[in-house]
């Protein structure tokens, strides 16, 4: 699937008049997995890049949860209220015991499970019962928000 998606992006860019260049100074866009910040110093103001170092710390659900927790701890109780937008979340399988306890405590609460290393909704499921949880599930289980606060479109 990833190769097919890459072909679609390349095709769309070529139809729009873009051409491939191996040289960064000639490029309007740099499409790659950037592993070093050295690429940023070479970019001109008009050039765009699709990834930047450290972006996986927010892009992957487990890393995002870990970093939000770190920030809450760093800021302390008073200031951490700014991070209340993240619902109660468990990292599985590491926090499986705690998650099962939460399921037993409030049997009416729904949870949403999101697997690690998947995207576009693949593998996401709603969890209502302990029987829905398998020991080998790897991902995050978040408290399901029934009426989320949405921004107007």
Image (spheres, rainbow, N blue to C red):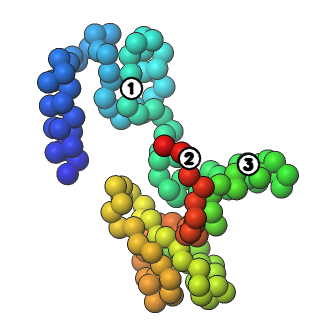
Question: In the depicted view, which residue is nearer to us: 122 or 147?
Answer: 147
Report which residue position mark 3 lands on. 82
- The disc, 3 or 1, on the residue closer to the chain's N-terminal end is 1
- The disc, 1 or 2, on the residue closer to the chain's N-terminal end is 1
Report which residue position mark 2 lands on. 151
Q: Which mark is residue 49?
A: 1
How many numbered badges does the structure rendering display?
3
Find residue 109 and report its image quarter: bottom right
Q: Does residue 121 appear left or right of residue 103 in this picture?
A: left
Find residue 94 and report its image quarter: bottom right
Which residue lies most toward the front here? 152
In this rendering, the label closer to the viewer, 3 or 1: 3
Q: Does residue 6 appear left or right of residue 40 in this picture?
A: left
From this view, report whether residue 122 is shown above or below residue 15. below
Q: Helix, strand, or loop for circle 2? A: loop
In this rendering, the label closer to the viewer, 1 or 2: 2
From this view, report whether residue 138 is shown above or below residue 99. above
Would you call the spot at circle 2 few (<14 residues within 10 Å), some (14-19), or many (20 or more)? few
Give the residue displayed 70% in from the left and 51% down from the top: 83
Give the residue displayed 73% in from the left and 48% down from the top: 82
Q: Horizontal and vertical percent for residue 71?
A: 71, 49
Residue 66 can be seen, yes or no: no
Q: Horizontal and vertical percent for residue 102?
A: 63, 81
From this view, report whether residue 136 is shown above or below residue 55. below
Residue 80 can be seen, yes or no: yes
Give the residue displayed 63% in from the left and 63% down from the top: 87
Q: Horizontal and vertical percent for residue 53?
A: 48, 34
Give the residue displayed 54% in from the left and 77% down from the top: 110
Would you call the spot at circle 1 few (<14 residues within 10 Å), some (14-19), or many (20 or more)? some
């Amino acid at each position: 699937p990833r190769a097919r998606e890459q072909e679609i992006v390349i095709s769309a860019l070529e139809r729009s008049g873009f051409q491939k260049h191996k040289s960064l100074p000639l490029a309007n866009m740099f499409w790659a997995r950037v592993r070093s910040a050295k690429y940023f110093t070479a970019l001109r103001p008009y050039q765009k890049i699709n990834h930047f170092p450290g972006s996986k710390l927010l892009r992957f659900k487990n890393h995002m949860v870990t970093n939000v927790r770190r920030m809450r701890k760093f800021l302390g109780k008073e200031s951490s209220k700014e991070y209340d937008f993240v619902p109660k979340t468990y990292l599985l399988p590491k926090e499986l015991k705690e998650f099962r306890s939460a399921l037993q405590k409030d049997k009416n609460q729904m949870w949403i499970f999101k697997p690690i290393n998947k995207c576009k909704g693949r593998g996401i499921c709603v969890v209502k019962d302990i029987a829905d949880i398998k020991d080998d599930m790897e991902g995050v289980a978040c408290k399901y928000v029934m009426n989320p606060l949405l921004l107007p479109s």
